Amino acid sequence: MKTLILGAGYAGLAVATQLKPTPGLETLLVEQNSYHTFETRLHEAAAHNTRVTLPIIPLLKGTGVHFEQAQVESVNIDEKEVIMKDGRVLLYDTLVVGLGSVTNFYRIPGLAENASELKSIDDADEIFNFINRAYSSDYEGNRDIVVGGAGLTGVELVTELAQRAEQLSKARGLPTINIYLVEAGPRILPVLDDALRAKAQKTLEDYGIHIMVGHRLMQATTDSVTVQTADGQQKVLPAGKIIWTGGIQARDIVKGEKLEKGPGGRIAVDEFLRAKNYPEVFVIGDMSLAMNQEGKPVPTTAQHAGQQGRLTGKNIMRLARNEELSPYEPTSLGEFVSLGGLMAVGWMKLPWNQKLAITGGMAHVMKRASEWKWRTSIE
């Protein structure tokens, strides 16, 4: 059974590292980078140049999985073909698609052309280089930063940037920069309850971050953004750096006549995470429109991508042994938001579907523990 795994993000790498040498199973992992990126820690790399990557090949030891560093151009699941950027065509019996997501700029004029993203280590490097350059003695121009989107990524990023700016300001004797967090919705961090959200907002305010909820980003230029309130009032924010974290959409890379897609371009899957109408194609991670026990879409988070990947790895070995597949049963173990330094807020799941709210240093420890749990699961 010739199996291709496309992508080595949280989902794809979980599949590959779950596998063991199995008679009749031939597996190739295809990824454009030679390393896996801890995307949930990119905000640390952007502010402090923290190392957030691991080389892939050592992680595949003992799995029987081969690795090829290459870029996928498109996937034709009607013909069972994966077309590569270099023109080659790879064939498969079983396919796992874990190619992740791209930033959704919502067609906001000038945003895609002028805003940085935070989806890769290159994006993090660009932001890190800017904030250091902004504190150099010969820097000319606006030094302020506008971050669009107050979800997990946006909030974690602004807190780390504020912390870095404070360090540089003290070290170099320059005034601190202004950091604006712009959110179209009525609140930051909609994934948290009111008490945890209030704690997080207080922390952001203590950092001096300008929180602008209820402000829709309307337009971006090379050195400014225009925002608008619900009553139509507009304001221009000058900016030396614009960063957009306000949305994602699935990569539009898989083609099939009977393919079903949902919101954000995510591919509808069955209870085994196989694309509907294509039982030989597993779709996992950000590209997958899987449903939870209440019939709602499973969130596009690292913990759910890892769960999907581990299950899919086991199901591929079951396929090779002609055994029945196990269905996907998603579970949310908790959610923690880093707020710079040793500060975090979040919750963890307790028995009987209860939640325990945690703040401060203990929340930071729990967030780190979840990251180490992921790391040990792939090593």
Image (cartoon, rainbow, N blue to C red):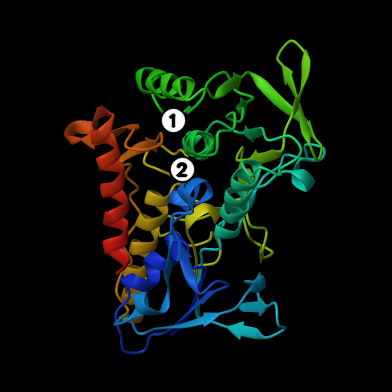
Q: Which quarter of the image is occupied by the N terminus?
A: bottom left
Residue 157 in view in this figure: no
272 sits left or right of 132 in the view: left
Front residue (pair 373, 92)? 373
Residue 214 badge: none
Q: Position of residue 150 (x, y in %)?
A: 55, 31
Farthest-out residue, top? 231
Instruction: Name the residue that disc number 1 marks.
Output: 191
Type of residue at label 2? Pro
Q: Position of residue 2 (x, y in %)?
A: 47, 85
Tell me which residue sits at (31%, 57%) in the image. 374
Return the disc, 1 or 2, that comes first in the chain's sequence. 1
Q: Residues within 10 Å of mark 2 (few under 14, many from 20)?
A: some
Tell me which residue sits at (63%, 53%) in the image. 126
Type of residue at label 1? Val
Q: 200 above or below 135?
A: above
Q: Which quarter of the image is occupied by the C terminus?
A: bottom left
Instruction: Name the residue that disc number 2 marks.
Output: 299
Name the secondary structure under disc 1.
loop
Q: Position of residue 165 (x, y in %)?
A: 53, 36
